[in-house]
């Protein structure tokens, strides 16, 4: 999924909200992983060393256990 233009100085919280909106999920249920680390909302994307064309992994938490 391509989320469109993203500024590397963007706060992680804003990025999570943007991805969640594209996926149609609640931002509180979405986790973003980059190089094995979960991005924390108090930081910016730049704090994690993200660069143009970086790949991140999105994990959606399922509430209520297994399906």
Image: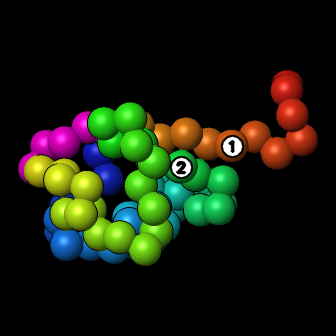
Residue at (19% x, 63% y) in the render: 46
Q: Name the residue under label 1.
A: 61
Task: Confirm whether residue 50 shows in the render.
Answer: yes
Q: Position of residue 15 (x, y in %)?
A: 38, 64
Does 38 appear above or below 16? above
Q: What stretch is highlighted in magenta?
A: 52-56
Residue furthest to the right in view is: 64
In the drawing, does residue 28 fall left or right of residue 46? right
Q: Residues within 10 Å of mark 2 (few under 14, many from 20)?
A: some
Does 59 appear above or below 7? above
Give the distance between the C-alpha atoms of the residues marked 1 and 2, in whole angstroms.
8 Å
In the drawing, does residue 51 fall left or right of residue 6? left
**Residue placed most toward the observer, 2 or 28:** 28
Q: Where is residue 6 in the image (x, y as percent from the top left)?
A: 22, 63
In the drawing, does residue 44 fall left or right of residue 16? left
> Residue 8 sits in which quadrant?
bottom left
Mark 1 or mark 2: whose residue is earlier in sequence: 2
Q: What element carries label 2?
A: strand
Q: What label sits on residue 9 in the rendered view?
A: none
Residue at (10% x, 50% y) in the render: 52
**Residue placed most toward the observer, 18 or 51:** 51
Q: Position of residue 42 (x, y in %)?
A: 43, 74
> Residue 27 sits in which quadrant?
bottom right
Residue 53 inside the magenta-drawn segment: yes
Q: What label sits on residue 31 in the rendered view?
A: 2
Q: How would you classify the magenta stretch by its main secondary structure?
A: loop
Do the CB atoms of the residues marked 1 and 2 lie less than 8 Å apart? yes
Q: How crowded is mark 1: few (under 14 residues within 10 Å), some or many (20 or more)?
A: few
Residue 41 inside the magenta-drawn segment: no
Residue at (17% x, 53% y) in the render: 49
């Amino acid at each position: 999924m391509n989320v469109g233009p993203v500024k590397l100085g963007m706060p992680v919280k804003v990025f999570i909200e943007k991805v969640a909106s594209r996926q149609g999920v609640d931002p509180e249920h979405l986790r973003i992983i980059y190089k094995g680390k979960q991005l924390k909302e108090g930081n910016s994307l730049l704090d994690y060393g993200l660069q143009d064309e970086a790949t991140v992994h999105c994990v959606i938490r399922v509430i209520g256990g297994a399906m």
